[in-house]
């Protein structure tokens, strides 16, 4: 028996799929979910067997694979490592995964959106298989952009004096982060960084990002020389990386520029930050120069 897959029914199916303690069916006549064993249900099933259809298959192994898929797609290495540890602990893995995410509000929201989107896709595939049997065309679905949903929780604005201390702390952290990577890999120079330590907002145009709760998350700073604008800093706190904040700051910066007063935009990028290069290429940046450095102390040691 045919039935319409409404948004309300999708929500009910989602809820029922995650309830592993009971079996549920779609009552195609009423367009609702039914579950449990009672005499009325049994009688209806016997009298009209085609009226009830089993929900899409979903068990704990499907949930685990979904968590693995989400974790593998994270671009934040710190959070990815934490969740990988949680997934490999064996007993209590679902609780461990949930507890780990509870300490990362933005990533937690991203997980819920990702999970809902993937499960809805599973439901639509199941429904389309039914439509095949009915001789009907498939329905489509437009998945929500998870990162856009997450970015809605961030505020992008010009900085104030109160942001200086947080930006300076972030800058010092990034300096240490790059220094450690460089020492471990090449024992050469400390990569040139973008800002003066004394005041982290030297540019003619600077933007910062904060969470909905008011926590400092990231900033981008520039310096203008004639018609050339140099992006001197684009730094994101470790716990907020991989959410598209750096790209969002870059986009908002470009939107504010007047092509009559700015003709060229430059940005030096440390080797360790090359993962951001695809973002710049999407914004129509092109490679301009390659800088090499030789540390004589290493050469003569």
Image: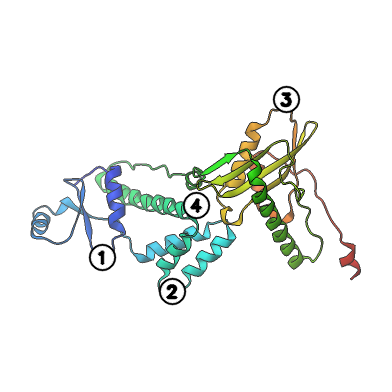
Estimate the spatial distance between the alpha carbons at disc 3 and disc 1, rounded to whole Å: 65 Å
Instruction: In the displayed orientation, state which residue is furthest to the right.
Output: 300
Estimate the spatial distance between the alpha carbons at disc 2 and disc 4, rounded to whole Å: 26 Å
SS at badge 3: loop
Residue at the disc numbered 2: 90
Q: Give whichever of discs 1 and 2 has the lower sequence position.
A: 1
Estimate the spatial distance between the alpha carbons at disc 1 and disc 4, rounded to whole Å: 30 Å
Locate residue 58, reporting x and y percent.
33, 60
Residue at the disc numbered 4: 106
Locate residue 107, reporting x and y percent.
49, 54
The residue at the point 61 percent across, 56 percent down is 238
Q: Give whichever of discs 3 and 2 has the lower sequence position.
A: 2
Q: Is residue 61 visible?
A: yes
- Local crowd at mark 3 within 10 Å, few (<14), some, or many (≥20)? few
What's the mark number on residue 21? 1
Residue 84 left/right relative to 224: left
Instruction: In the displayed orientation, state which residue is furthest to the top.
Output: 260
Please state which of the two labelled residues, at mark 2 or mark 4, is closer to the viewer.
Answer: 4
């Amino acid at each position: 028996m045919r039935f319409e897959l409404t948004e309300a029914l999708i929500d009910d199916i989602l809820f029922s799929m995650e309830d592993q303690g009971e079996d549920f069916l779609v009552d195609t006549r009423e367009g609702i979910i039914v579950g449990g064993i009672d005499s009325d249900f049994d009688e209806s099933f016997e009298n009209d067997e085609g009226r009830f259809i089993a929900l899409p298959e979903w068990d704990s192994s499907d949930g685990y694979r979904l968590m693995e898929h989400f974790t593998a797609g994270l671009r934040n290495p710190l959070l990815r490592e934490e969740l990988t540890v949680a997934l490999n602990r064996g007993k209590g893995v679902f609780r461990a995964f949930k507890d780990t995410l509870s300490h990362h509000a933005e990533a937690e929201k991203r997980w819920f959106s990702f999970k809902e989107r993937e499960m809805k896709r599973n439901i639509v595939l199941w429904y389309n298989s039914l439509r095949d049997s009915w001789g009907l065309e498939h329905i489509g679905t437009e998945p929500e952009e998870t990162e856009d949903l997450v970015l809605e929780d961030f505020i992008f604005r010009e900085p104030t004096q109160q942001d200086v201390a947080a930006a300076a702390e972030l800058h010092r952290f990034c300096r240490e982060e790059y220094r450690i990577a460089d020492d471990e890999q090449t024992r050469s120079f400390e990569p040139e960084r973008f800002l003066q330590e004394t005041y982290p907002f030297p540019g003619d145009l600077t933007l910062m990002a904060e969470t909905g709760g008011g926590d400092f998350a990231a900033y981008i700073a520039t310096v203008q020389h004639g018609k050339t604008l140099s992006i001197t800093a684009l730094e994101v706190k470790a716990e907020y990386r991989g959410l598209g904040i750096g790209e969002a700051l870059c986009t908002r910066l470009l939107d504010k520029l007047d092509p009559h007063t700015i003709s060229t935009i430059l940005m030096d990028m440390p080797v360790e930050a090359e993962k951001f290069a695809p973002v710049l290429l999407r914004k129509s940046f092109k490679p301009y120069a390659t800088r090499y450095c030789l540390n004589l102390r290493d050469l003569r040691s």
